[in-house]
Image (tube, rainbow, N blue to C red):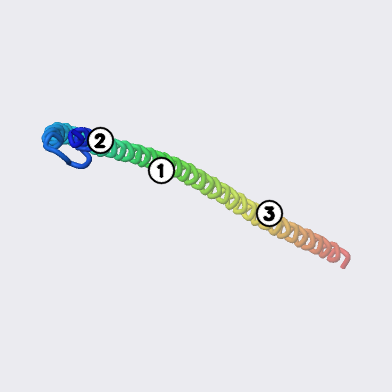
Amino acid sequence: MLCALAAAVVGPLAGCGEAANNTQPAQGAGQAGEGAEEASEKQEEASEAAKNRELLSLLEAKKREEAAEAAASRTERLAAAKAKKRERTAEKEAKKREAAAVAKAKREEEESKAAAKRQSEAAEKREAEVKRQEAERTARQRSTTTTTTAATPSAGEAQ
C-alpha cells in the first residue's frame, strides 16, 4: 500500500509502479499534441509577423521613394524657375545695354554733326573775314589809286 500511495504521490516524479507509467504516456501524448499545435500557431504567427514587417518595410520604402521623387521634382521646378528668371534678367540687361549703345551712338553722331557744323561755320567765318579784309584792301587800294590819280591831274594843272 505504501507503494501505491507513494506511486500516486511520487509516481509521476520517480516512475515507481505500473499505474504511474500508464497514465504518463497518455497525458504526455495529449500534451504533445497541444504543444505541437501551439508551436504551429506560434510559427504561423511569427511567419505572419515577418510578412507584415516586410510589407511595412516595403510601404515605408515606397513612401520614402515617392517623397524623394517629389523633392527632386520640386527642386527641378525651382531650378527651372530660377533659370528662367536669370534668362529674363539677362534679356532685360541686354536690351538696356543695346538701348544705351544706340543712345550713345546717336549722341556721338549728334555731337559729331554739331562739331562739323561748328567747324563749317568757323571756316565760313574765316572765309568771310578774309573776303572782308580783301574787300577792305581792294577798297583802300582803289581809294589810294583814285586819290593818286586825282592828285596827279591837279599837279598837271599846276604845271
Give the camera-side residue of 34 and 64.
34
Can I make out residue 30 in this image?
A: yes
Q: Residue at x 15, y 32 (%)?
A: 27
The type of residue carrying mark 1 is: Ala
Inter-mark Cα distance, 2 to 3 = 112 Å
Instruction: Estimate how packed mark 2 is, as few (under 14), some (14 to 19) or many (20 or more) residues with alpha carbons within 10 Å.
Output: few
Give the camera-side residue of 136 and 19.
19
Residue 122 image position (x, y, % from top left): 67, 55
The type of residue carrying mark 2 is: Ala
Quadrant where the image shows the N terminus = top left
Instruction: Estimate how packed mark 3 is, as few (under 14), some (14 to 19) or many (20 or more) residues with alpha carbons within 10 Å.
Output: few
Mark closer to the chain start, 2 or 3: 2
Residue 46 image position (x, y, % from top left): 23, 37
Residue 91 image position (x, y, % from top left): 45, 43
Inter-mark Cα distance, 1 to 3 = 67 Å
The answer to whether the residue labelled 2 contacts the one labelled 3, judged by CB atoms less than 8 Å apart, is no
Give the camera-side residue of 77 and 56.
56
Give me the disc on residue 79.
1
Relative to 100, is 86 on the left or the right? Answer: left
The type of residue carrying mark 3 is: Lys
Furthest residue to the right? 158
Q: Residue at x 69, y 59 (%)?
A: 130
Report the residue marked by disc 2.
49
